[in-house]
Image (cartoon, rainbow, N blue to C red):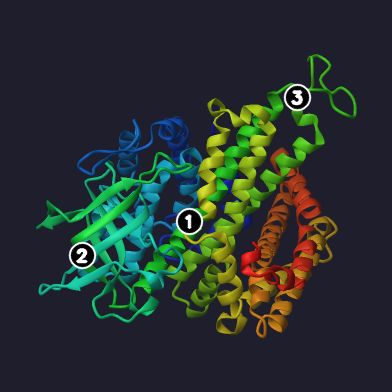
Amino acid sequence: MPTYKAPVEDALFLINDVFHLERYGNLPGFAEATSDTIEAILREAAKLSEEVLTPLNRVGDVEGCTRRDDGSVTTPKGFKDAYGRIVEGGWIGMSVPEEFGGQGLPATVTVMMNEFFCSANMAFAMYPGLTQGAIAALLTHASEELKKTYLPKMTQGTWTGTMNLTEPHCGTDLGLLRTKAVKQADGSYKITGTKIFISAGEHDLSENIIHLVLARIEGAPAGTKGISLFVVPKFLLDGEKLGVRNAVACGSIEEKMGIHGNATCVMNYDGATGWLVGEENRGLNAMFTMMNEARLGVGVQGLAMGEVAYQNAATYAKERLQGRSISGVKYKDKPADPIIVHPDVRRALLTMRSINEAGRALVYWTALMGDVAHRSDNVKDRQAADDHMGLLTPVIKSVLTDGGFQNTVLAQQIYGGHGYIAEHGVEQFVRDARIAMIYEGANGIQALDLVGRKLAKDGGRAVMAFFNEVQAYLKERAGSDAMNVYLKPLGVSLAHLQQATMWFMNNAMAKPDNAGAGATDYLNMFGLVALGYMWARMAEAALEKADDPRMKGKLVTARFFAERMLPETAAQLARIEAGAGSLMELADEAF
């Protein structure tokens, strides 16, 4: 059975030594989030993850969720009790404003905690995670009446939340959406339609499920301009108590590759009563609040799966005896050397570790910018932080989910044949991690979003700010001999990224297919540069504690990333500058 130990020490290193959380003390909620407080929270989250959620991961995969004849859904054995622990501990509402029953702590703390939960049991962690996304959308866009009605119970966790976008005929292209909303005399709406792939759409963990549903009001414009967002509860309210069942039901549970412990449902709305969130025909604007939360959360899922896969692969590599080292016997007292002595096994392990540690830093950095964007009273700081979020969200979602899946496959390869057998648990990591590359906008869509929208937005303000920050960092430390091993490769890769950006500017306007052809390579290049920047910052902090053996490990891993991972940007640049010619030349029927 797989094991998991939450990386508390790595988390504390990042917030204390790399990002210096004390510098954000002027923001609401940060004064209470002292280093000691955060450490206490993380250690409790680690304990819950390791002792309660991890043992249920295999249970959820084997049992899955069961739909009854009445449309109700039963979650796997142990999930309901574990969810009760989540509610009891106040984990869901940790960062929600106190007026709605939350603790008002920085959202960054919630992101840190969510990584632990996802590594321990990704399918389970989706239930509270989706509720947090729904809370974020309601906080930003709902009326005061709707907030008072739904947020306290959702913050507490006794009610959960979902997002309902996808329909059988439309996924990414929401302009094709058919679910309709008919306005009633009392101001409510009747919602009718079918939604698919709805995570946590029906279950037995909470008293009520609050669905956020995209629908088109009768007479609304066609396309995305005519979409509105509605809150549709599973149970209607009778005063402050639960009333009758609403006309929304789970038609079936999707049979899927992984995350079996989460109920992924087909949801049927048959004249269900709902209430408008925000303005008519502005539903996508509201839903994107939840989508951005979800995309960052999915990036965390990729990181989390990569971390638990690495931990188990590293343990196995140190225990599995097989052959002898090509440079001579290393363990003379054993019949064979453990496979950790082989360079190719170390290549795989260091690849996994270098992506995980830099990915965690990138997530924390971006989560902190999210807190600045939502909490700062400085307009300029809020704008810069919001630019950062918009630019880095597709990068984090795509690069960390690609990397997370790659890491689970590398772990499976280290296990060899045992990695293909269910009892060792690694093949579940592969199956569970795969969905993160697909949902909340497939990674190819994230690449198009970055190249097609984010680069040019506001005259390129966000991307230029990123370039300027990394360039300034490199320039200020150019005279440091100890840092050169990390800075020089980063500088080369940054130059590749800037060259690719200019190439798009010169070649994509007249021929948009050039942008589409190079989008994925560009996003991955951006990700490597961002991860390389994180490694430089971590290395700088580690050099201050060079006597600590853990810091030596970070410095070696940082050098591995600089030497073995960053050079990939040269190949990515070559592919981008090749353009769309060979990609688009064949006629459709030739495929």
Q: Nearer the viewer, mark 1 or mark 3?
A: 1
- The residues tagged by marks 3 and 2 sit, at their Cα atoms, a distance apart of 60 Å
Q: Are marks 2 and 1 in contact (CB under 8 Å)?
A: no
Per the rendering, the mark at residue 274 is 2
- The image quadrant that residue 578 belongs to is bottom right
Q: Is residue 47 above or below residue 265?
A: above
Q: Which residue is more in the foreground, 381 or 320?
A: 320
Q: Which residue is mark 3?
A: 338
Kind of residue at badge 2: Gly
Q: Is residue 110 left or right of residue 470?
A: left
Q: Nearer the viewer, mark 3 or mark 2?
A: 2
Label 2 CA crowd tier, 10 Å (few <14, some 14–19, many 20+): many
- The residues tagged by marks 2 and 1 sit, at their Cα atoms, a distance apart of 25 Å
Label 2 sits on a secondary structure element that is: strand
Per the rendering, the mark at residue 439 is 1
- Measured as percent of width and height from the top left, residue 290 is found at 40, 63
- Measured as percent of width and height from the top left, residue 219 is found at 25, 80
- The residues tagged by marks 1 and 3 sit, at their Cα atoms, a distance apart of 38 Å
The answer to whether any part of residue 548 appears in the image is no
